[in-house]
Image (tube, coloured by chain):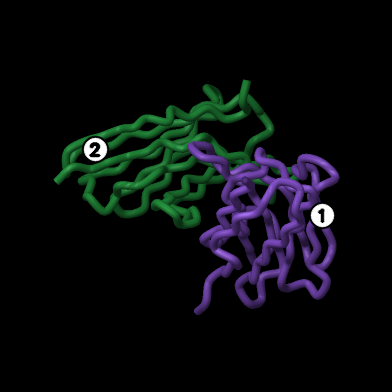
Chain colours: A purple, B green
Amino acid sequence: GAGVSQTPSNKVTEKGKYVELRCDPISGHTALYWYRQSLGQGPEFLIYFQGTGAADDSGLPNDRFFAVRPEGSVSTLKIQRTERGDSAVYLCASSVGGIGYEQYFGPGTRLTVT
Amino acid sequence: QKEVEQDPGPLSVPEGAIVSLNCTYSNSAFQYFMWYRQYSRKGPELLMYTYSSGNKEDGRFTAQVDKSSKYISLFIRDSQPSDSATYLCAMSALEGAQKLVFGQGTRLTINP
């Protein structure tokens, strides 16, 4: 079956602009996660959704970042007033849900802020 | 200090060698331990998953967890060039188990 898909695969934007990154999880997965991976580093947790609600948003770095999942499926990560330090690969993952379930990762969106 | 420490390498070994990768951690609340493999420009894929202490074997891969030392390992036997990738350890606590904390990743190259 289809895996987690993310669009766009690459995004180049200018400092100060607004961007939206989309994640389409595996069908039937109720849990969805966003991570950020900087060059040469491991992924860093941003936010976790169970259904439509954000169950844990403790990893969002500041109020320029927010994410939605209005119908419990597709999610959008939104970044306002982008900064050069936001440049990274943004990974989305989904899982059946619950403790210990495998998180399936998408290929990521490579964001470059110039 | 990071919660999870992992030597970034790079590590280069000949085909057929046994590879040992490891991570240390500081948070004693971690109960779930995972190893992910990540190829260049791809998302991480889960290799091994262990709950609490002990060993787990899956084909050529063996994962070990020593909670008393806060140390986890991944062994790859009969390594193949296709095993060349970055290996990431990840952990989570019982509470907030969905929030994975990753190591930096070790870049591994298997030379034919």
Question: On screen, A28 above or below A23?
Answer: below
SS class of the residue under badge 2? loop
Residue ID at (76%, 56%): A18
SS class of the residue under badge 1? strand
Which of A99 and A36 lies nearest the eye of the viewer?
Answer: A36
Percent x, y for residue B21? Answer: 38, 34
Q: Residue furthest left?
A: B112
Residue B98 seen by the camera: yes
> Label 2: chain?
B
Quadrant of res A110: bottom right
- From the viewer's perspective, is B110 left or right of B37? left
Percent x, y for residue B62? Answer: 36, 44
Three-letter residue code for mark 2:
Ile
- From the viewer's perspective, is B96 left or right of B72? right
Residue A55 badge: 1
Q: Which residue is mark 2?
A: B18
- From the viewer's perspective, is A42 left or right of A80? left
Marks 2/1: CA–CA distance:
41 Å
Three-letter residue code for mark 1:
Ala
- From the viewer's perspective, is A81 left or right of A4? right
Which of A8 and B81 lies nearest the eye of the viewer?
Answer: A8
